[in-house]
Amino acid sequence: MPKDPRPNILWYCTDQQRHDTIRRLGNEHINTPVLDSLTETGTAFTRAYTQSTICTPSRASFLTGRYPATHHVHRNGNAYFPDTETLVTKLLADAGYDCGLIGKLHLSSAAHRLEKRPAADGYRFFQWSHHPNPDYPEGHDYADWLAHEKGVDPVSLYGGLQENIGPGVPAELHQTTWCSEMAIRFIREEREGPWLLSVNPFDPHPPFDPPQEYLDRYNPEELPYPLFQESDLEHQKHFCAIDQQTRHAQNPYQPANTEPNSEVTRGDMGSVPPAAYDARMVKACYYAMIEQIDEQLGRIISVLKETGQYENTIIVFTSDHGELLGDHGLIYKGCRFYEGLTHVPLIISWPAAVTADVTSHALVELVDLAPTLLEAAGETMPAYMQGTSLLPLLQGTADRDHHKDSVVSEYHGAVGGPAMPDQTHGFMYFDGRYKVCIYEGHDVGEIYDLNADPGEFCNLWFAPDHSELKADLLWRAAQRYLATSGPGVERIGRY
């Protein structure tokens, strides 16, 4: 029997990684040799955008190929993932793919610290781990690995970490390392048909705590400050009622009192930012986390090559959303649509079938990934999917610098808790030059001309000489938002 010619799929999705964190794509301050090599063997999309700036709605979008306005999985902490939605992994499993997941799924709340899987997710191999924490019970696969294979008590390992920013657990015990260990086991399994493996490490999501050996590679004093102008302090006051994990902007150039906040537990450090921080130290930790990811991804790719599977494996590298990282005086995430949050890395490599060393400046969205993988696997995209396959761009049969006229991102009460009282609804429309951001129930909005103002400092929303532009952008944004709502149940009658 001939070997199944369909490609394997390695889908590596980090958590909260900005677009500007790859050396070969312009960041000379970070070391990412493995990601650099992926851009040489495939296509780097320099203008890829997430459908939400929060984990769960973003992941629901790229796993279903549908926009948030259609799948309605709007919030972190959902009680369940609706069984009316179908993951692309289920479609591929039904088509004969052996599907596995390692790390985060994050489509619903982790009740009692363990997330309930969707009824039909398609995953045969399932090694689940949300954010590393000192109090996970049996069944959290990373914690079980620490306890049963490494002989380390996860409560003791993580219980001593008291700061949002600074060195974390050793590299050999790190969750990112565990992800690679589990991925290598999956890839080495004997099987007849193709496979899909979703690898979802928690990093570089905060707390910003890389292993010391990676942090030692970065000198904070040699890193640039975040994007910031004094006007940001006043500007952000107009938006402080709109939900955001950082409620008040601070000047990253001014020394800060960085004493640890003992009132915030380890489990909350990923969503409650420190009251004060050294912005360049944050960046050093963040870059160190990404460099560890880069090295661990390299381990997986080495095994693909060793086992003869590399040439016919599609490697997708992306992230669910970005991180503000001090830009405009803010860190972490929330209902903001700055480039640091909405613009994500996306590299796709498939040595056997796509052109190498291509940089595409087309506007693309994460919702396009599910259709891309289905087409690459020879499967028909269901009518209910809303994304558009990127395969023609990858194979050079379409204009590599044009895919869509605009991209969108949205936020619908996505993060709860007392720090998020407004439960904001927000929407972003971006046509490659102009970005407009609208917030329901608020009399403020944003318009940026990224050609003239790439740092997004000059808000044109209230500028009298841009009133016609504002009206036109709002009309186009409304049209695009309406188009993200799916048709619903299939029509079988005439009327």
Image: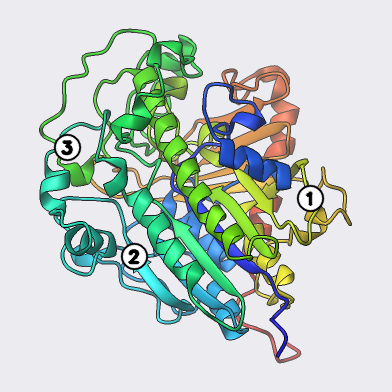
The amino acid beneath tag 3 is: Leu
Q: Nearer the viewer, mark 3 or mark 1?
A: 3
Residue 152 position, x and y percent, is 15, 53
In the image, is 296 to the left or to the right of 34?
left
Taking the spot 46% from the left edge, 76% from the top edge, the residue there is: 121
> What's the amino acid at mark 2?
Trp
User: In whole angstroms, how far apart are the C-alphas of marks 3 and 2?
Assistant: 22 Å
Residue neighbourhood size for the residue with mark 2, other residues' Cα within 10 Å, grouped as few (<14), some (14–19), many (≥20): many
Could you tell me if residue 252 is visible in this image?
Answer: no
Residue 434: quadrant of the picture: top right
Spatial CA span between label 1 and label 2: 34 Å
Quarter holding the N terminus is bottom right
Asked which secondary structure carries label 1, the reply is loop
Sort mark 3 into few (<14), some (14-19) or many (20+) by Cα contacts within 10 Å: some
Q: Residue at x 65, y 34 (%)?
A: 435
Q: Position of residue 55 (x, y in %)?
A: 43, 52
- Residue at the location (48% across, 64% down)? 72
Mark 3–mark 1 distance (CA, rounded to whole Å) = 45 Å
Compare residues 358 and 191 and report the one nearer the observer.
191
Q: Nearer the viewer, residue 5 or 484?
A: 5
Which of pointers 3 and 1 lies earlier in the amino acid sequence?
3
Say whether disc 3 or disc 2 marks the residue closer to the N-terminus: 2
User: Where does label 1 land, which residue?
Assistant: 403
- Horizontally, residue 123 falls left or right of residue 316, namely left
Quarter of the image containing the C terminus? Answer: bottom right
Tell me the tag on residue 268.
Answer: none
Q: Residue furthest front?
A: 306
Q: Which mark is residue 161?
A: 3
Residue 128's label in the rendered image is 2
Residue at position x 54%, y 65% in the image: 63
SS assignment at label 3:
loop
Residue type at numbered disc 1: His
